[in-house]
Amino acid sequence: MADRLLNVAEVAVRLGTWEESGERFPRRLIEERRIAFVKVGRYVRIRESVVEAFIEAHTVQPVLLRPAGFRRAA
């Protein structure tokens, strides 16, 4: 199945930035070449898989804390 091409507004919604900045954040990602995009004439489209990969690559994993009983003495 082919990837769906999303417009900038759809990418902003998918990234959860639509309410705060509208299309500014995805457009900045495009301008800074931090995300792959497709030019279709004058329109910019981003593959759905690229957005998912961007989210996955920028997901921060939680830090595992050591048990409290094994702290070093000061």
Image (cartoon, rainbow, N blue to C red):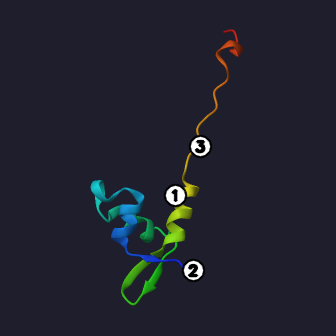
The picture places residue 6, in percent across and down from the top left corner, at 42, 74
| 66 sits left or right of 46 in the view | right
Q: Which residue is mark 1?
A: 55
The label on residue 1 is 2
Q: Earlier in the sequence, mark 2 or mark 1?
A: 2
Given the current orientation, which residue lies at the most extreme bottom position? 41
Residue sitting nearer the eye, 40 or 74:
40
Q: Earlier in the sequence, mark 1 or mark 3?
A: 1
The picture places residue 20, in percent across and down from the top left corner, at 29, 54
Say if residue 34 shows up in the picture.
Answer: no
Cα distance, mark 1 to mark 3? 12 Å
Above or below, 56 against 34 in this view is: above
Residue sitting nearer the eye, 54 or 29:
54
Q: Amino acid at mark 1?
A: Ile
Q: Secondary structure at mark 2?
A: loop
Which residue lies at the image location 39% right of the left edge and 90% below the top edge?
Answer: 41
Which residue lies at the image location 53% right of the left edge and 61% below the top edge?
Answer: 54
The picture places residue 34, in percent across and down from the top left corner, at 51, 66
Quarter containing the C terminus: top right
Q: Which residue is mark 3?
A: 61
Which residue lies at the image location 49% right of the left edge and 71% below the top edge?
Answer: 48
Which residue lies at the image location 68% right of the left edge and 12% below the top edge?
Answer: 69
Q: Please tell me in which quadrant of the rendered image residue 22 appears.
A: bottom left
The picture places residue 50, in percent across and down from the top left corner, at 53, 69
> Nearer the viewer's eye, disc 2 or disc 1?
2
| 45 sits left or right of 58 in the view | left
Label 3 neighbour load within 10 Å: few <14, some 14-19, many 20+: few
Q: Amino acid at mark 2?
A: Met
Q: Are marks 2 and 1 in contact (CB under 8 Å)?
A: no
